[in-house]
Image: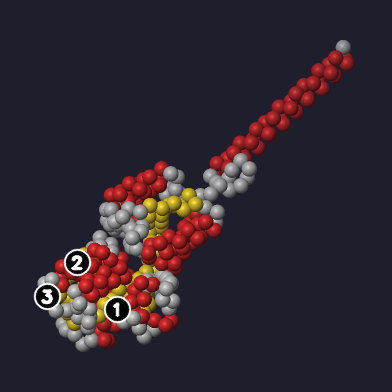
Amino acid sequence: MENSKKSNARKEKRYGSGILVLVLLAALVFMAAGIIGFSGNVSESGEHSPRIFGATYMTRNNPYFDVVHEAIEEVVEGNGDILISRDPQQDQEKQNDQILEMIDEGIQVLFLNPVDWEAVKPALIACQEAGVPVFNIDTIVKDTEYVVSVIETDNYQAGMICAEDMMKRIDSAKIVVLDNPIQMSITYRVQGFLDTIQGHDEYEVIYQEAAGGELEVAAKVTSQFLEKNIPFDVVLGGNDPTALGALAALQQHHQEDGVLIYGIDGSPDFKSMLDIGYVTGTSMQSPKGIGQKAAEAAYQYLDGEEVEPYISIEPVLITSENLSNFEINGWQ
């Protein structure tokens, strides 16, 4: 009888110990599951799965944005992650729809260059609701409270230095301005130019028209103006493609002689024309620098670090006098 009691006691002890072990194992499993669930990027093998980044630019019909994209892509892929992109072709409604598509595809960060600084707002709201941080590149959105950071050239200064150079070269001018009101980078460039010549009545803007920021559109707009036979001395293009479109129209009409042509970008195409004396100057941007800084800021944010809400890159004016300091066939 005594032996039977001892045997039952030992069984109960082993049974209790077994339950304790199972409870501990279960707790460890739940803890591990909690850790994996928190990170969101750890696979069953313990390796980090790639994060998906999205990028959209107002158009890819401008090599400038190809360089921006390549700079972002280099950083993202260097971190073992994936970058997907869309081309809205200057259509804001299409861009908004494409952003929703990328959200559905699981992007965790969006790099955004808007077609229309104001009409992009529905997409910004959708990103906020989906928990997708937005990094606004090259041209600012109106509703900046929806973005983590704006990364762009000091566009106002880019316009200023074009005006300052023009005023050093000629004592008076009748000026044609080719802008793009829905693109705030170009709007700020034009404003910087206009504010610089303000109070100098000898410098007069005689024509200002939207040219879409594209070579073909600018060529058409300039051709229409040339048919009016109004004398002028200077063309300010809101970017390099716009300025080169104006040059193409002027050459077609054999009216390029004596006209100062300014662009903003520092593109290889513009520098080539500058090298042979067809254009006057361009405020250099650095699409490589903008893309790299935007990608670095995104990773800082994902790592929980503080990110500057506005990151500005200073422009430099390239003219025939300092062209030898820059690579003609490449971007900065």
Q: Amino acid at mark 3?
A: Asn
Residue at mark 2: 221
The secondary element bearing badge 3 is classed as: loop
Q: Residue at x 59, y 43 (%)?
A: 43
Q: Residue at x 35, y 48 (%)?
A: 98
Query: How far apart in space, not on screen, are marks 1 and 2 (Cα)?
Result: 18 Å
The secondary element bearing badge 2 is classed as: helix
Q: Is residue 32 above or below residue 155?
A: above
Q: Is residue 273 visible?
A: yes
Q: Amino acid at mark 2?
A: Val
Q: Is residue 213 above or below residue 226?
A: above
Q: Earlier in the sequence, mark 3 or mark 1?
A: 3
User: Seen from this angle, which residue lies furthest top?
Assistant: 1
Label ID, residue 229: 3
Q: Which class describes the residues within 10 Å of circle 1: few (<14), some (14-19), or many (20+)?
A: many
Q: Position of residue 99 (x, y in %)?
A: 36, 49
Q: Earlier in the sequence, mark 1 or mark 2?
A: 2
Q: Which class describes the residues within 10 Å of circle 3: few (<14), some (14-19), or many (20+)?
A: few
Label ID, residue 279: 1
Q: Position of residue 39 (x, y in %)?
A: 55, 46
Q: Which class describes the residues within 10 Å of circle 2: few (<14), some (14-19), or many (20+)?
A: many
The secondary element bearing badge 1 is classed as: loop
Q: Position of residue 125 (x, y in %)?
A: 34, 48
Q: Is residue 200 visible?
A: no
Q: Earlier in the sequence, mark 2 or mark 3?
A: 2
Would you identify the image quadrant in which residue 21 lies?
top right
